[in-house]
């Protein structure tokens, strides 16, 4: 499973971003590190640093994108130069890639009987996003509708 959530560990002076597979893991790690920073502030009587430096950085959330570097094979000139001896490829400059939270049904299926968003088609020209659930080996959609991707439902709004 991909790590789609993050938290910032504020339990020491170096605030570290940690990646998590579930939102619950990210929330718990955020809270645990904030409590650890609070305990340290209490022990050292340094709530000014806790309130101004640690607590504002105790956050968690959804990963919206990331930097990725592709690779390419060495050119003939690079091989002949001898500079790249022992290497078969070059790592390219990083670029930003937005995370797409749709999960292909070829890669993974949702847990049974939990509502999810689905994406698919009925005939090649008719695309649809809908709510469905997966049960007994299929989504509860008409047989003529082909589901290609799914994702968990977003959190409901709060008033």
Image (tube, rainbow, N blue to C red):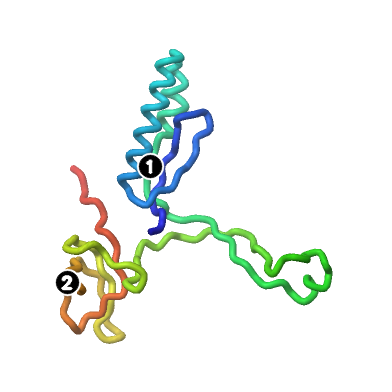
Q: Position of residue 79 (x, y in %)?
A: 78, 72
The relative height of residue 119 versus residue 151 in the rendered view (above or below) is below
Please identify the quadrant where the N terminus is shown: bottom left
How many dots with numbers?
A: 2
Crowdedness near tag 2: few (<14), some (14–19) or many (≥20) residues, C-alpha within 10 Å: few
Instruction: Work out whether residue 23 or residue 159 is closer to the camera in this orientation and state it.
Output: 23
Please identify the quadrant where the C terminus is shown: top left
Q: Position of residue 77 (x, y in %)?
A: 80, 74
Q: Residue shown at 25%/65% (left/top)?
A: 117
The relative height of residue 125 versus residue 118 in the rendered view (above or below) is below
Q: Nearer the viewer, mark 2 or mark 1?
A: 2
Q: Give the secondary structure at mark 2.
A: loop
- In whole angstroms, how far apart are the C-alphas of marks 2 and 1? 35 Å
Q: Residue shown at 40%/29% (left/top)?
A: 55
Q: Based on the displayed image, in which of its 4 quarters is residue 127 positioned? A: bottom left
Spot the residue most to the front: 86
Q: Position of residue 100 (x, y in %)?
A: 40, 63
User: Which residue does the numbered mark 2 point to in the structure image?
Assistant: 136
Q: Based on the displayed image, in which of its 4 quarters is residue 27 positioned? A: top left
The relative height of residue 101 versus residue 119 in the rendered view (above or below) is above
Q: Position of residue 94 (x, y in %)?
A: 60, 59
Instruction: Work out whether residue 132 or residue 123 is closer to the camera in this orientation and state it.
Output: 132
Which numbered disc, 2 or 1, marks the residue that appears first in the sequence? 1
User: Which residue does the numbered mark 1 point to in the structure image?
Assistant: 60
Crowdedness near tag 1: few (<14), some (14–19) or many (≥20) residues, C-alpha within 10 Å: many
Q: Residue shown at 25%/58% (left/top)?
A: 153
């Amino acid at each position: 499973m991909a790590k789609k959530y993050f938290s910032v560990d504020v339990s020491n002076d170096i605030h570290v971003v940690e990646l998590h597979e579930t939102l619950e893991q990210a929330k718990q790690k955020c809270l645990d590190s904030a409590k650890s920073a609070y305990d340290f502030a209490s022990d050292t009587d340094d709530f000014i640093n806790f309130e101004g430096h640690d607590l504002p950085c105790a956050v968690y959330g959804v990963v919206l994108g990331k930097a990725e570097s592709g690779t390419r094979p060495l050119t003939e000139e690079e091989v002949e130069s001898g500079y790249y001896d022992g290497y078969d490829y070059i790592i390219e400059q990083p670029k930003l890639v937005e995370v797409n939270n749709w999960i292909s049904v070829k890669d993974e299926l949702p847990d049974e009987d939990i509502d999810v968003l689905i994406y698919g088609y009925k005939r090649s020209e008719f695309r649809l996003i809908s709510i469905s659930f997966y049960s007994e080996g299929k989504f509860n959609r008409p047989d003529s509708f082909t589901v290609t991707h799914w994702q968990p439902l977003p959190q409901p709004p709060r008033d």
